[in-house]
Image (cartoon, rainbow, N blue to C red):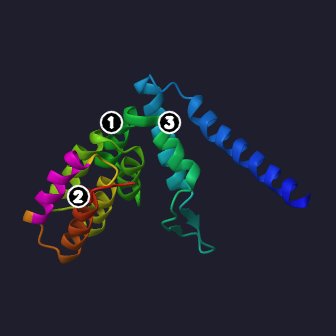
Amino acid sequence: MGREVAWALMLSCVVQFAGTAVGQCGAIDRNSAEAVSQEVNRVFNEALDKMEHTLPSGTKAITWIPPDESVRQQIGCLGVLAVPATSELLRNTNRSFGHVLAIRMLGWIGGPEIVPPLAVVLSNPGDSVMLKIEALQSLVAAPPEKALPTVQQVLRTEKNRHVLEKAASVAAELEAPARD
């Protein structure tokens, strides 16, 4: 009898959590580019704000803290209309870890629309190895037929060994016959 109660309680929590995640996105008019843009900016800034801490000395410290699953779900729920706002953040943020977060957000959105802004990161010789590796990882969320040409371009032009290794790994993943 205790086992049945535990299962019922667990199922109730899962259903309640799922409803909460859908409700969060449901409050945003996903047909309105302006509403989606405002939500992308809110989520982006809140996630980055959580990474900032003031030390006892009064110095501000910023530590990368991966956003929790609710942030990933919210951005993914916003869908393709979130790509322009996220791309704008990627181009213009000056916040610590802002570029990393924007690149990851594009991966959470997924789809063919994420390829052009990620391709810009990958083609920019001034972008860091870390950003290029993040961009390659996010490309996995795009359809292989759209992402693979960008990854192959990286394999032809990139000089950094770490970026090349990641590009080869992503290419193999995109070329795999059955992707999950």
Residue pointed to by mark 2: 175
Marking on residue 136: none
| Disc 2: CA contacts within 10 A as few (<14), some (14-19) or many (>=20) | few
Q: Is residue 42 magenta?
A: no
Q: Nearer the viewer, residue 110 or 67?
A: 110
Residue 139 drawn at (x, y percent) = 29, 53
Amino acid carrying label 3: it is Glu
Element type where label 3 sits in the image: helix
Residue 124 in view in this figure: no
Residue pointed to by mark 3: 39
Mark whose residue sits in front, 2 or 1: 2
Q: Quadrant of the N terminus?
A: bottom right
Residue 66 drawn at (x, y percent) = 51, 62
Q: Quadrant of the C terminus?
A: bottom left
The residues colored magenta run 144-155
Q: Is residue 147 magenta?
A: yes
Element type where label 1 sits in the image: helix
Amino acid carrying label 1: it is Pro
Quarter of the view holding residue 111 = top left
Mark whose residue sits in front, 2 or 3: 2
Residue 31 drawn at (x, y percent) = 44, 22
Cα separation between marks 1 and 3? 12 Å
In the picture, measured across the screen, residue 161 lies left or right of residue 41, that is: left
